Image (cartoon, helix red, strand yellow):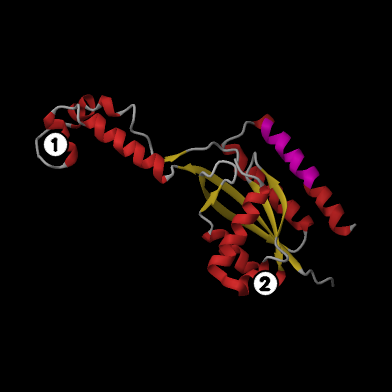
Amino acid sequence: MVRHKNRYLVCFVRADEVEDRAARDDRAGANLQASSHLPSDVRASLTGQKRKNLSAGEIISRTDKLSATDNHTTKRAGRRLTFSDRDLHSALRSVIETNLGDWGWCLLVPILAIKYFDQETGLVILRTPREYYGLLWVACSLLDRLRLPSTGRWISVQIRVVHVGGTVRSCLRRTVQAFRRELPFFLDEHALKEHTIRIERALVDLTSAEHG
C-alpha cells in the first residue's frame, strides 16, 4: 500500500471588498454634513437627541438626501475573485505565522502549495503535509481578510473546506461533485458545463504531473 506524504484540501473561496478606514471616515463625514440639512425633528430622531412619534415612512421620506451618500460598509466585489493564487498563498503564510508561530511555519509552509486556483469559481486545492493537514484547515478558518498588493485594499475572505484527499485523483472526483452542487446557484447550465470541463482537464493534468 502506498503511503502518501501529502494531503490535499479542496476549498471554495468567497470574497467581499471591505471598505477601508479612510473611506469609512469620509463617508461618515459626508453623512454628518448631509444630515445637517435635514429638518430638526428628523435629525433629532436619527441621533437619538429627541424622541418624536414619527412613522417609518415619514423618516424614510425625509431622509432621501442621505441615500446618495449612505453606502454599506461591505461592498460585494462580485463572484469572481479579484486576487491571485500568490496573494492567497502569502495570506495563508501570514496567518500561519501569526497564529501558529515558528512551529506551525516549519511544519506547514515548506510543503504548502496551491495546486489549483480558479478565480471564476473560487475553487482552490491546497497541498499540505499529511500529519498536519488539520493545522492548515485551522489556518483557512482563521483567514478572514486579505490585502491586495496592487491597490492596498482589503478583501474579506471566507474559505470553506469541502474535502480532504490523499491524491489529486480522489480530489478530482470530489471536486467535480462539489462543483456541480455549488455552481447551479449562480451559473447557467451552459457556463456550468464549460467550467466543469475546464476543471476536469486541469485536474487530469495535475494527476498526470503527480505520477510523472
The quarter in which the N terminus is drawn is bottom right
Q: Compared with residue 62, is residue 157 higher up or lower down, i.e. above or below?
A: below
Q: Residue at x 59, y 46 (%)?
A: 149
Residue farthest toward the bottom in the current orientation of the protein: 103
* 1 or 2: tag closer to the N-terminus: 1
- Residue 107 is labelled as 2
> What mark, if any, has residue 44 been given in the picture?
1
Q: Main secondary structure of the magenta part?
A: helix
Q: Quadrant of residue 20?
A: top left
* Residue 60 placement (x, y as % from top left): 23, 28
Asked if the magenta segment contains residue 22, the reply would be no
Q: Which residues are magenta?
A: 191-202
Kind of element beneath mark 2: helix
From the viewer's side, name the closer residue of 180 and 102: 102
Rendering quarter of residue 186 = top right
| Amino acid type for the residue under numbered disc 1 | Ala
The x, y position of residue 209, in whole percent, is: 86, 54
Image location of residue 41, percent across then percent down: 11, 31
Q: Is residue 25 visible?
A: yes
Point 65% across, 41% down: residue: 119
Q: Position of residue 204 (x, y in %)?
A: 82, 48
Mark 2: amino acid: Leu
Q: CA distance from mark 1 to mark 2?
A: 58 Å
As drawn, is 174 to the left or to the right of 4? left
Find out whether residue 194 is within the magenta segment. yes
Q: Nearer the viewer, residue 128 or 22?
A: 22
Q: Is residue 163 left or right of residue 25?
A: right
Locate the C terminus and report the quarter of the image it occupies. Answer: bottom right
- Judge from the rendering whether residue 185 lies leftward or rightward of residue 106; answer left or right: left
**Would residue 73 be seen by someone viewing this image from the given angle?**
no
Q: Which secondary structure, mark 1?
A: helix
Classed neighbour count for the residue bearing mark 2: other residues with Cα under 10 Å, few (<14), some (14–19), many (≥20): some
